[in-house]
Image: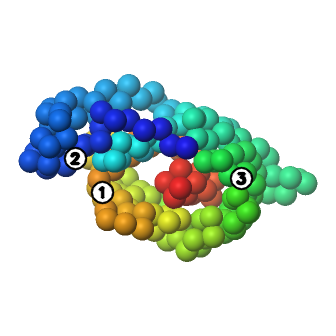
Amino acid sequence: MRSRLLPVLCLSLGSSLAAGCGAAAGDDHAARTDILGAAGPGEFILLTARGELVSADIEPGRVLGPDVNLGVYAADGGRDGQAVRGVAFNQAVSVTATREGATGIVGGAPLALSVTRADTGLRARGLVRGALSDYRVDERQIAGVIGRCSYELTRSGRYYEGPRSCGGQPYQVTVLLPRGLSSWSDAALATALGLLLGA
């Protein structure tokens, strides 16, 4: 279950709408700044205008947070690549990431991604939790369909900001990617982001 943060329910809404939420727009901005400003160098954060917060500490071999506990290991049986194992959003994860992509199971649904380098970032295409996915992550944007959600985020300083839609009306989100992800292989990185952003 994702964490709920009532103080940021009105985040990124217009001033006239925010006034109806019972808190001044400045209060919302302060809550956002506190949450994002307190992030450590290895912390992933997804903060939404609906007051949802997904956070996790990301290290070279592990992702750990309230909703996710994943380990990254050498692939089974001496094969090339990495194994991503654990639990994400109450679903068991068993994925193998190789140079070409990632395949495995997430909560009984398939994850199968082809991962390629695209300009300064990467592009992943295939399935995340059984849902068709096609997304790009680079120094300028996070864009495309990830699992059941679509993103059109643009980088602003340390953060990516913009609309996200998960089967309904779009709403604003802010994403902080930690520097620690730079040590991950492309396929393991695409898998971790697919799980964290596509829930």
Residue drawn at the location 44% of the way across and 58% of the way down: 137
Q: Secondary structure at mark 3?
A: strand
Residue marked by disc 1: 171
Which disc, if any, is residue 128? none
Q: Are marks 2 and 1 in contact (CB under 8 Å)?
A: yes
Residue 189 seen from this side: no
Residue marked by disc 2: 12
Residue marked by disc 3: 93
**How has the structure been colored for display?**
rainbow
- Which one is in front in this view, the residue at disc 3 or the one at disc 1? 1
Identify which amino acid the numbered label 3 is placed on: Val
Left or right: 16 as drawn, with respect to 63: left
Residue drawn at the location 69% of the way across and 67% of the way down: 110
* Mark found first going from the N terminus, 3 or 2: 2
132 and 79: which is toward the camera: 132
119 and 1: which is toward the camera: 1
Identify which amino acid the numbered label 1 is placed on: Tyr
Neighbor class of circle 1 (other Cα within 10 Å; few <14, some 14-19, many 20+) is some
